[in-house]
């Protein structure tokens, strides 16, 4: 892999992030929706988005992280989303993005990093263990989506 650069994301990275979400994570989205969400995230000092660029290949990975507070532990940083282009996996991109996240979290005063990964992503689980993360629990996720009129009212 050519030289890898980790940098803070900018709105112009939205198409690359949309592509990574689809091809690496199977998450559908549109560039304009990604850009709109990124605009909100990038203005929030409790969140960060890093991208990994590899020479002519452009953006080959990204990581979104944010701080959160709980009543039962010190401030933690959640690695909310890590996506690496399939052709770049195994080349140090994910490791470099996680190192950037860890550095940011330390500078923000976080006590550590928390992340979740779906049961089926066994390769990701092995990666996280290889970079020093410990499997602490299995979970089930639940979600309730509000109707558009509910959110507006």
Image (tube, rainbow, N blue to C red):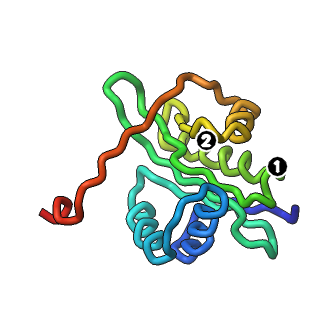
Q: Quadrant of residue 9?
A: bottom right
What residue lies at 63% left-to-right and 39% top-to-bottom? 120
Alpha carbon of mark 1 to alpha carbon of mark 2: how far?
A: 19 Å
Image quarter (top left, top right, bottom left or bottom right) of the C terminus? bottom left
Q: Position of residue 128 (x, y in %)?
A: 69, 36
Q: Residue lying farthest right? A: 1
Secondary structure at numbered mark 1:
loop
Circle 1 or circle 2, nearest the eye? 1
Decide if residue 5 is in sight here: yes
Q: Image point 45% across, 32% down: which residue?
A: 140
For the residue pair 142 and 102, the one nearer the viewer reads as 142
* 46 vs 82, nearest the viewer: 82
Residue that label 2 marks: 102
Give whichever of discs 1 and 2 has the lower sequence position: 1
Q: Nearer the viewer, residue 128 or 109?
A: 128
Decide: few, some or many residues near mark 2? Use Cα within 10 Å; few <14, some 14-19, many ≥20.
some
Residue 16, x across and y down, in percent: 62, 71
Estimate the x, y position of residue 105 in percent, counting from the top left: 54, 42
Res. 90 mark:
1
Q: Position of residue 35 (x, y in %)?
A: 46, 73
Left or right? Give the position of 33 relative to 103. Answer: left
Is residue 91 positioned above or below 71 on the image? below
């Amino acid at each position: 892999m050519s030289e890898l650069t980790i940098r803070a994301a900018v709105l112009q990275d939205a198409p690359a992030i949309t592509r990574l979400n689809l091809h690496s994570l199977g998450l559908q989205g549109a560039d304009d929706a990604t850009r709109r969400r990124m605009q909100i995230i990038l203005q929030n000092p409790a969140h960060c988005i890093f991208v990994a660029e590899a020479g002519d290949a452009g953006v080959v990975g990204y990581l979104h992280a944010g701080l959160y507070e709980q009543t039962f532990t010190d401030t933690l940083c959640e690695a909310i989303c890590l996506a690496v282009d399939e052709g770049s996996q195994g080349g140090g991109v994910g490791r470099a993005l996680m190192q950037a996240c860890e550095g940011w979290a330390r500078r923000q005063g976080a006590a550590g990093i928390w992340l979740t990964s779906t049961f089926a992503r066994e390769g990701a689980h092995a990666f996280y263990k290889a970079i020093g993360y410990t499997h602490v629990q299995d979970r089930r996720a639940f979600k309730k989506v509000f109707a558009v009129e509910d959110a507006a009212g």
